[in-house]
Structure formats: structure tokens, C-alpha cells
Image: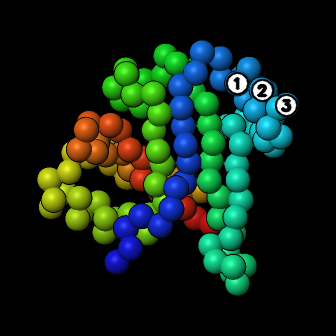
């Protein structure tokens, strides 16, 4: 079974998320939204299955990433999050919460070997 199928998002801390978002929109042409920017792409060249990767600046004071000195968090796209959750438990991986579901997918947070918070996302595309 594939576990990670791609990068679902890049989240990073900055002093002023609104100004940072505006800078990237103005200077690099990102089409921004209230959450940052969403990049759409297709899973394969012959696919009609559209996917997305999220880019989001967060306030430098956010506690969402876990450790205070963790400057960024990667969101990994995964398949079958419930099965992966069970595997991670059996492998002794630190799991920070239970699977949560939204209309755009399921999420779970874990710690990597260095203690960095990682977000796992099973999208509903």
C-alpha cells in the first residue's frame, strides 16, 4: 500500500501572514485566498483527476506546529488514513490526535523522528 502520495501543503511561520501573502501575490503572481494559495495539478499526465497543494503563511506565534522553534510544517497527502493510523500505532510512532474529518478530507498529526509535527491528509478530491 502506498502511504504518502505527495505533498498536500507547506505551512510556515512569518511575522505578518497577510503582508507575506500580499508580497507573494504581487511579486510572484500567486493567486491567493484567505488560506494562502492553492496550486492545482493532475495526478498523472493522462488523468482528469485534479489534485491540489496548499501554501499557507502562519503567524510566527502559532502553536499549531507544535514546538515553538518549528518554523514550518509539511502536510503529506496519504491514502487510507485509517489503515495508516493503525500501522503507525503498531510501529510506535507518536500520534498527537485522533483522525478528524472535514468536507475536504481527513487529517491526523504525528511527530517525526526529530519531534517535528507532521500533518497527514487523506483528501476528498
* Residue occupying the point 70% across, 84% down: 46
Dot 2 and dot 1 residues touching (CB under 8 Å): yes
Label 1: how many Cα within 10 Å (few below 14, some 14–19, many 20+): some
Q: In the displayed image of the protein, which residue is found farthest to the front? A: 27
Q: Please give the residue where the numbered disc 3 appears in the rendered image.
A: 26
Label 3: how many Cα within 10 Å (few below 14, some 14–19, many 20+): few
Residue 4, by quadrant, is bottom left
Label 2: how many Cα within 10 Å (few below 14, some 14–19, many 20+): few
The chosen color scheme is rainbow
Disc 1 is placed on an element classified as helix
* Residue occupying the point 23% across, 58% down: 88
Question: Is residue 17 rendered to the left or right of residue 97?
Answer: right
| In this view, 125 is above or below 55 | below
Q: Which mark is residue 45?
A: none
State the quadrant of the N terminus. Answer: bottom left
Percent from the top left, x then y, of residue 28? 79, 37
**Structural distance between the alpha carbons of marks 3 and 2:** 5 Å
State the quadrant of the C terminus. Answer: bottom right
Question: Considering depth in this image, is 86 or 24 the residue closer to the camera?
Answer: 24
Percent from the top left, x then y, of residue 65? 42, 31
**Structural distance between the alpha carbons of marks 2 and 1:** 5 Å
Of labels 3 and 1, earlier in sequence is: 1
Q: Please give the residue where the numbered disc 1 appears in the rendered image.
A: 20
Dot 3 and dot 2 residues touching (CB under 8 Å): yes
Q: Please give the residue where the numbered disc 2 appears in the rendered image.
A: 23
**Structural distance between the alpha carbons of marks 3 and 1:** 10 Å
Q: In the displayed image of the protein, which residue is found farthest to the bottom? A: 46
Amino acid at each position: 500500500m502506498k502511504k504518502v502520495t505527495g505533498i498536500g501543503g507547506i505551512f510556515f511561520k512569518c511575522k505578518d501572514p497577510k503582508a507575506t501573502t500580499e508580497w507573494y501575490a504581487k511579486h510572484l503572481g500567486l493567486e491567493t485566498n484567505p488560506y494562502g494559495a492553492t496550486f492545482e495539478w493532475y495526478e498523472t499526465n493522462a488523468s482528469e483527476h485534479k489534485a491540489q497543494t496548499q501554501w499557507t503563511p502562519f503567524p510566527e506565534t502559532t502553536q499549531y506546529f507544535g514546538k515553538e522553534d518549528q518554523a514550518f510544517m509539511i502536510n503529506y497527502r496519504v491514502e487510507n488514513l485509517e489503515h495508516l493510523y493503525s500501522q503507525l500505532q503498531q510501529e510506535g510512532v507518536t500520534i498527537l490526535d485522533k483522525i478528524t474529518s472535514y468536507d475536504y478530507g481527513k487529517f491526523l498529526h504525528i511527530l517525526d523522528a526529530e519531534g517535528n509535527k507532521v500533518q497527514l491528509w487523506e483528501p476528498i478530491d
